[in-house]
Image: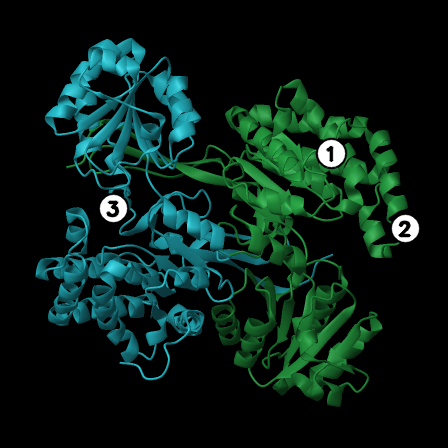
Chain colours: A cyan, B green
Amino acid sequence: MSSGPPEDIKASCERVARAAAEAAPAIRALTGGERRSLLRDMASALRERTRLILDANAHDRVAAAGLSEAMRDRLSLDEERIAAMARAIEHIADQPDPLGGVVEGRILPNGIRLERRRVPLGVVLVIYESRPNVTSDAAALCLKSGNAVVLRGGREAAHSNRAIVDALRAPLNWRNMGGALGFVDTPDRGAIDELLRMDKLIDLAIPRGGPALMSAVTAAARVPVVKHDAGNCHVYVDQHLEGLEETAERIVINAKVQRPGVCNAAETLLVHRGVAERMIPRLTDALARSGVEVRGCERTRELAPRARPATEEDWATEYLALTIAVRVVDSLEEACAHIARWGSRHTEAILTASLLSAQRFTELIDSASVMINCSTRFADGGEYGLGAEIGISTSKLHARGPMGAADLTTTQWVLTGSGQIRG
Amino acid sequence: MSSGPPEDIKASCERVARAAAEAAPAIRALTGGERRSLLRDMASALRERTRLILDANAHDRVAAAGLSEAMRDRLSLDEERIAAMARAIEHIADQPDPLGGVVEGRILPNGIRLERRRVPLGVVLVIYESRPNVTSDAAALCLKSGNAVVLRGGREAAHSNRAIVDALRAPLNWRNMGGALGFVDTPDRGAIDELLRMDKLIDLAIPRGGPALMSAVTAAARVPVVKHDAGNCHVYVDQHLEGLEETAERIVINAKVQRPGVCNAAETLLVHRGVAERMIPRLTDALARSGVEVRGCERTRELAPRARPATEEDWATEYLALTIAVRVVDSLEEACAHIARWGSRHTEAILTASLLSAQRFTELIDSASVMINCSTRFADGGEYGLGAEIGISTSKLHARGPMGAADLTTTQWVLTGSGQIRG
């Protein structure tokens, strides 16, 4: 539709980022009530444009004919899914305001009143893949927390994302703040590198995706990054399992099977040799009955002959599918060493009746979440009571584990005096 | 002294970082009482080796003969300064333990007990210049918060830093944890780039220094960074100044003169035109009497003819010296726009009798600290009641403004259940 030569990638990214940076003070200046109204208007706009969004989604689905069924399912929208996206925005709208809270406050000995207040970050860049509902969730969470946002979605969903952004932006346009919802849809992946270099315009980048995206982001970024990386999650079955055999089976199945395609699903099962004879046949049979392919170490295969042999690659793999790697370990410490070597520091579970084992496991595991006698699948902002989440951080800085609207803020120190000077 | 070819820079950096990463779990496992004892032993070791450290410092001072007097002063050690370093370590040792605190905790609706606990980051890299006391402060703060540390000091202080590290490491060696205090002293600046790429071994990099170092760090880092950048701090004198003329003069002088070489000293003075006629002559005269060179905009120079003309470069400069830039502005909003354009988002002060101006300034200023009727010089961890500080963060993520031991930690979610699975 455009006339003249296509806009240079760098220039187009910079235009979007600059518009967001210029709109950021206006978003920051909205009251909590005004931000709530804005989000509710966005939800309404999404509902009103359902037909347009479904038409755009049909384009993406035609182009996606060659992709896997799982990918195509994630891409697909229908009236119910769009209604769910609108409800999610309203849910975020109605959460408590993440801004303005006084994180700490005191009167200093010299009489100055010190307050540390929660304020917006400024401009947040979200880089994500396939699922179009991330477009509305990310926009709503960033605006709820007083930030402008720049979205960079996956190519597969380009038409759907554009239609969703057009809908969401309407209530911003009425308020002369359209720049606060930026969207970069040039298909060239170089756009990501360009955006990640704009540390004068963008305050935080949140990449959500696989190892290839993470590695590219880490190499290119001048902008601060909080990663939402892979989850190579482990379940360790301890030797002290008296009375928990049934519980262990239920949790292992839940962690692996309930939703295998997500980052908090279990990928490797570690079993203490003291209970291997009892538990390996029981657990691998239950897994097989649930349709899970088992890949085991040599000792596992002695007890579960139908398991295929596991290689080092299996320890490193986030299957995101009905496959699990199983290893017998000699001790809790060996289990933790395995996790330290092969894990992604996302979420690990221990199943044990022993208080000492639970304590030791928690001390030794350097992951965002540790589960004691419950499923890895609970690693989720909604489950933790954080409200909607923008994702699950695998970074250690700023936000760790499920990341909600409050993690899209920073703090500002405000000191109110009456003429104090430093001696 | 070494035989054979010199070790490759990359290999030597990796050796130090790997030793730190391997020692990190042992430091993490120390109790708060054990970390306190370790730090007190380090303070004693520093005192015992005063003579050796002074000898090493003499080497550095000979080599520094060509540097500025300010640089040479910052580099110089004497018995009193080493005693002060030891006392600072003891002060950090006696601070409350930054680890183990439960940041939030609740019972989830399904009965799982959720706790978010404060835990160490792992390995912290500190890159700094000249002042040898940073060596002991940084080591003590990182170990106090349960982290291993890798130090990279300035070339000018290489001998002094090495002697200090040797002293501090002795109590770690007694405990077989010598690797937890890493020190990279190869003079090649390429060492910084190598360290900043080691995101598998290092969890956080803290660079403290000038714009050249910051820009190099931002470009090279794969490791997460919290910057301790320049402070181009502003004092804005509002039009509503009834009764505060004397206070304004005292604060301007304090902010500029009390210690001009530090990042929270004022560099630019902005004066509302409504009080310019009254305040510009008074303030510039007072500054001149304190030995400060004034560089003013055209309107300033009409009221203070002795001021030299200011250029755009003056608005951008962190003088760190007895020089100040002065500009007359038409409104509070223009002052804030000037600060947004030229400032470094460190610390800004407003001097005003108006509640509305104070509120508006705080809303519009996107800096780590805002001072209302007190000196910018208060932007300091000790003044804020944070205990000793590792520096003043100019990043927005993770830590903003004065950064204490608590900011060298992250959190871990621990969920304790009794067999819960996700439905």
In the depicted structure, whether residue B342 falls above or below residue B420 = below
Q: Position of residue B364 (x, y in %)?
A: 49, 71
Compute the Cα span from label 2 to label 3. Answer: 62 Å
Identity, as a three-letter code, of the amino acid under mark 3: Gly
Say which mark, if any, is on residue A382. 3
Identity, as a three-letter code, of the amino acid under mark 1: Pro
Compute the Cα span from label 3 to label 1. Answer: 55 Å
Front: mark 3 or 1: 1
Of B397 and A410, nearer the camera is: B397
Disc 2 is attached to a residue of which chain? B
> Which residue: 68% across, 72% down?
B268
Quarter containing the C terminus of chain B: top left
Disc 3 is attached to a residue of which chain? A
Q: Is residue A228 visible?
A: yes
Neighbor class of circle 3 (other Cα within 10 Å; few <14, some 14-19, many 20+) is: some
Identity, as a three-letter code, of the amino acid under mark 2: Ala
- Both marks 2 and 3 on one chain: no
- Both marks 3 and 1 on one chain: no
Tag 1 residue: B6
Provide the secondary structure element on which disc 2 rests. loop
Mark with earlier residue (2, 1): 1
Q: Position of residue B185 (x, y in %)?
A: 72, 39
> Which residue: 74% across, 43% down?
B187
Front: mark 2 or 1: 1
Direction from residue B226 to residue B116 in the image, left or right: left
